[in-house]
Image (tube, helix red, strand yellow):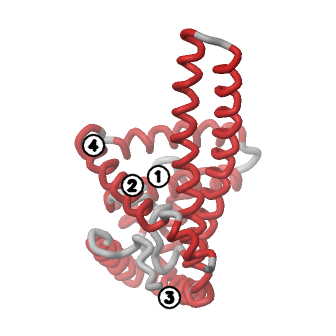
Amino acid sequence: MDRKKICEKLGANQFQKIVFKVEDIKFKAIDKFFPNIDTWYSKRCDRRANKLCLRAKNEEEKKAIRLKYNYKKMLFKREVVEKQNRNYHMTLNNASDFHRYLEWNRKVHRNGMIKNIICMAGSGLLMMMSGGLISALALGYLVYNTICLGVNFECVNLQNYNLCRLEEKREILQRIEERQKEKDIEKYSKVGKTIYDKLEANVVIPKSDEVVSAIENIDELLQLRSLALEIKAKRMASNGTIGKIKMKS
């Protein structure tokens, strides 16, 4: 039995369904209870970016900070609009980033498993050495870490499973990603430069009318229109089958 089959036997497919169900519940809760969460997140990023800019040694460092945090805000906004965690879904032009996320997330949950085992051992020792309320609290902590250990194990197993699936098609996905990026550069290079400059210039993300006012010729305007239509189409498609690691076995 190969590694992928072992992961399936250990419950990767079933746990992935749970992960996506939790994701759906998360965004429904955001829509109902935190409709302005993207505004809150943007303000948080603005505060952080302004602090870092004060410590920056030169304008180039400031530009890099502004670009980084404006990019983070845009990614978060896209998550809220599309109702998809960006790290749970793979598209044709983010296979490399998705692979890095899977490896990072697997490491996080492996460390979590080690912590859970240490806490379980400590709770067991405390139960043997004490009694009464302390023993009851230790038992509760033992149960809690046992559950967390199971969750962390399934997360590691799921990431191993998805890494196996990515490795099977990694060369093809890399070629597709490279072609897609080349295509985007060719299609949107002019307006992309205008947007890039705006993102570097200010901590606050530029509004659409600011971008439009910075456009200098008809080619840029046409590229901006094409880009807007493509983003709209992708967002509509995201409500379908795009991204939920829909790779045929």
Mark 4 lies on residue: 35
Mark 3 lies on residue: 183
Residue 77 image label: 2
Find out whether the residues at labels 3 and 1 contact each other: C-beta distance under 8 Å: no
Q: Is residue 78 visible to the viewer in this orientation of the structure?
A: no
Please state which amino acid type lies under the numbered disc 2: Lys
- The x, y position of residue 72, in whole percent, is 51, 54
Q: Quadrant of residue 175?
A: bottom right
Which residue shows up at 62% across the image and 88% down it?
171
- The x, y position of residue 98, in whole percent, is 56, 69
Find out whether the residues at labels 2 and 1 contact each other: C-beta distance under 8 Å: yes
Work out whether mark 4 precedes mark 3 in sequence or the reverse, and give the earlier one.
4
Location of residue 191 with respect to 35 vertically, above or below = below
Which residue shows up at 57% across the image and 49% down it?
152
Whole-Å distance between the Cαs marked 2 and 1? 6 Å
User: Judging from the image, what secondary structure is the residue with disc 3 in?
Assistant: helix
Label 3 Cα crowd, 10 Å radius (few <14 / some 14-19 / many 20+): few
Please state which amino acid type lies under the numbered disc 1: Lys
